[in-house]
Amino acid sequence: MQLSALSAHPVATRLRAARSVVGEIVWAVGSLWISSDMLRNWPDPEGYWRDTDPLAYALLAAVYLPFVLRRRFPVAVLVSTMLCVGTYFTLGYYHVPAVCGVLLALYTVASQRPRPVSLRCAAASLVVLLWGTRLAEPGIGPLSVGFVTVTTTVCWVAGDGSRRLRELTRQLRLEQEEKARRAVALERIQIARELHDVIAHHVSVISVQTGLAGYVFSSDPDTARRALDTIGASAREALAEMRRMLVVLREDGTAPAEDATPEVAGLGRLEELVRRVGAAGVPVDVTITGTAYALPPGIDLCAYRVVQEALTNVLKHAPAARTTVRVDYAEDEVRVRVKDDGRGDGHGRARGDGPSAGRGSGQGLIGMRERAMIYHGTVTAEPAPGGGFEVSLCVPVPRTGHAG
């Protein structure tokens, strides 16, 4: 993180820009020096080319020095280069030192500009270079034509490939950024779901017990004290689960040494959940069928949260209902059902017209279904045929090496 911050610092940005400019200057001056040295020292005993004079060096300077701007104005630099090289060839100077200028300018255009533009530039460059082949030594004219054609093609292909690679890299970076944004969004949804499940349940218990404690505070102190104990236990449990979430969200993934990591919620804590709901006034019967086995942590938490959310809904909408929780361990799936009998709102109203009639919607059900979908499971929440309300979960459990 510190390195990325340093690289984004304005001073670092200016240094990178200055380094690029210095590199272009060195490239242009070095190319001019090499070509001028080649022109000065190349032997010409047969007198094939025009004698070197100051105009030849001036034309080479006009070819290579504009390369300082080749990345900012690639097409303009190529046009300037072709004009100077064409003049150089027409005057009959030794042609090889000028050829590299056209090829380098063409490569820059192909790497910086769209393919239709670079193709037209490649065709114009080839015409200029073919004009220079008339200066080749006698007997190698056809070879020069082939060499120039192949070299021009190779330079264009290399530049176009560099452009396409850069575009693919940019596209890959954008896709990675989009994936990162989606991952952050999914993480936020998961955090919101956990917060809802934890807070909604414990606040519902605390709300019910607070009302009960206030109602019997003077007439039944023992009941009021038990209600207060339940409130305290629910608050501590909520804090413990919040602490567990914060541990998960820490950047380094570790808890402070002095903090013990809270126990992760799962069906192993079902009795504790039922006891807490029972203390809030909702009697719950638990039935477990099949041979219990260890569930994967994600599926275990999913099943627990579904039961917790269903019991929370009973607390909110049907606090007097008798509820049953049934957990069925099948060979390759686990099924959970939470059903209440429909005597829920404390005034004897039927479920269909009571406050619980619309329980099958809202953030709680959405969260349950999202959890189940992660593990290819299904959740249903609907009025039960005999009255009351029923929430069912079915999740496949991948198991290997288990007894049949």
Image (cartoon, rainbow, N blue to C red):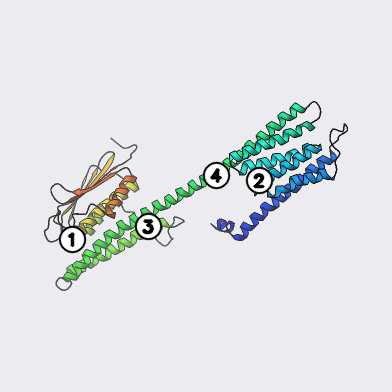
| Left or right side of 343 for 88 | right
Residue 150, image x and y in percent? 68, 31
Q: Residues within 10 Å of mark 2 (few under 14, many from 20)?
A: many
Q: Which mark is residue 245?
A: 3
Q: Secondary structure at mark 3?
A: helix
Mark 1 near mark 2, Cβ–Cβ under 8 Å? no
Q: Amino acid at mark 1?
A: Gly
Q: Residues within 10 Å of mark 1 (few under 14, many from 20)?
A: some
Name the mark nearer the viewer: 2 or 4: 2
Report which residue position mark 4 lands on: 169
| Location of residue 219 with respect to 197 vertically, above or below | below
Separation (CA) of disc 4 from disc 1? 61 Å
Nearer-N-terminus badge (3/2)? 2
Name the mark nearer the viewer: 3 or 2: 2
Nearer-N-terminus badge (1/2)? 2
Separation (CA) of disc 3 from disc 1? 28 Å
Could one spot residue 286 in this view of the protein?
Answer: no
Report which residue position mark 1 lands on: 281
Report which residue position mark 2 lands on: 74
Mark 3 near mark 2, Cβ–Cβ under 8 Å? no
Q: Which mark is residue 186?
A: none
Separation (CA) of disc 3 from disc 4? 36 Å
| Location of residue 79 with respect to 366 vertically, above or below | above
Mark 4 near mark 1, Cβ–Cβ under 8 Å? no
| Left or right side of 377 for 342 | left
Residue 348, image x and y in percent? 11, 59
Nearer-N-terminus badge (4/1)? 4
Nearer-N-terminus badge (3/1)? 3
